[in-house]
Image (cartoon, rainbow, N blue to C red):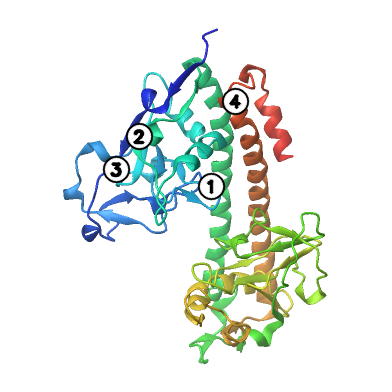
Amino acid sequence: MIPWSAVALGDVADLLVGYAYKSSDFTSDPNDTRLLRGVNIGQGFLDWGRTAFWPSEGVAGPRYQLADGDVVLAMDRPWIEAGLKRARLRADDLPTLLVQRVARLRGTGAVRTSFLHHLLATETFSRYLQGIVTGATVPHISQSQIEGFRFQLPPISAQDSICEVLDSIDDLIENSQRRVEVLEEMARAIYREWFVRFRYPGHEDVPLVDSPLGPIPDGWGVANVSDVCDLITRGVPPKYADDGPWTVINQKCIRDGRVSLEKARRQERAVPDTKQVRKGDVLVNSTGVGTLGRAALCLLDHPSLTVDTHVTIVRPALKGANPWFGLGIVSRQAEFEQLGTGSTGQTELSRSDIGAMNTVIPPEAIRIAFADTTWPQLEAALALLEQNRSLAALRDLLLPKLVTGQIDVSHLDLDALTETAIA
């Protein structure tokens, strides 16, 4: 067996720092070439929500063109909360140019690019960078610091075996994530078709009539959100305790129209009935800047769930209201952001402002038909997300042991492991 060898990252990897494209020349034209900046790098994923482009005729040569499989690492503000900002590019992310203060790592004859991707995901690499980061105002790391990381490098054959295991889990997660996005978009598309364009089943025989919100189908109504709700309330001031009986949803738990408990905490204070979250409630972030107005339809059926005082519970009273009501509230995030009042950092979205928003009310039969159509899609998406969390936990358990040689990959039964994880 070929032994593992102690190496520095810079000795075996091809590392490149991006080009200093002038921000004054950035464009918003998607026909130009996309730029990869630090703001686009998450904890193991790319986020193109804040995308800048560069005029195609001004591209600074092929050197800064990224390729499928490239690994990228943010050099300024390299952490999101406790997570290192690093990601791997896929074909869908291309063509893309590498911008300054972002490092690109690529394999050589000594190391596979995929192995570098998994190496950067280890806690050992993260702790190494945390120990050498400099800069009080803008924490940053340098190229030489990245290149100075030392680790045990397995031979290529072992790298390939390790990457086969970890990449297989990543592929399962990515495939499921794409299915989640398709299911959620299907539900949103049906919502727009029925309740924005009014092309619901049987619409051909129903004329449009005037309303305060414009033409709506005859027999539909207009009301304030508060008029159709049983409850609009903030949560509890939590008394956190690791063994507390209640799980507390905070603002970090609400993102992309979903509720996740990954960043939730436990607390021990008594929770009145009116502060307990039920399946079908809509949760709205109501304090601060950046997350204000984010909303999600809660699909979780959890016996001891609440929210803190920065989140508002909105519960519809109408029969069959969910998910019609939930998807409608989620679609109005931009309006909620505009309703925030107060000083910078203390912006608040009041319960009265949420309740005062107007909404179109479809008949009960339409609401129930929509629920029958979309609940299965949304619940299937939730099941896939739960499956992905189990797979990610399995990957995170295996990763440090595989890349350091603590587990012999030849003894792993990957099929059995993944079947157990998603069972």
Query: In front here: 136 or 298?
Result: 136
Label 2, label 4: how many angstroms apart (C-alpha)? 26 Å
Query: Where residue 192 sits: x, y (%)?
Result: 52, 70
Residue ID for mark 1: 83
Task: Say which amino acid is labelled 3.
Answer: Gly
Question: Based on the displayed image, in which of its 4 quarters is residue 367 positioned?
Answer: bottom right
First-in-chain label (1 vs 2): 1
* Among numbered discs 2 and 4, the one appearing first in the sequence: 2
Q: Which residue is mark 2?
A: 144
Do residues under tags 2 and 4 come within 8 Å of each other at their CB atoms?
no
Circle 3 sits in a helix, a strand or a loop, which is it? loop
* Residue located beneath label 3 in the image: 18
Q: Earlier in the sequence, mark 3 or mark 2?
A: 3
Residue 213 in view: yes
- The quadrant of the image that shows the C terminus is top right
Q: Which residue is mark 4?
A: 402
Q: CA distance from mark 4 to mark 1?
A: 20 Å
Disc 2 element: helix
Q: Residue furthest top?
A: 1
The amino acid beneath tag 1 is: Gly
414 over 86 or under it: above or below = above
* Circle on res. 304: none
Label 3, label 2: how far apart the Cα atoms are: 14 Å
Measure how far apart labels 1 and 2 are at the Cα level. Answer: 21 Å
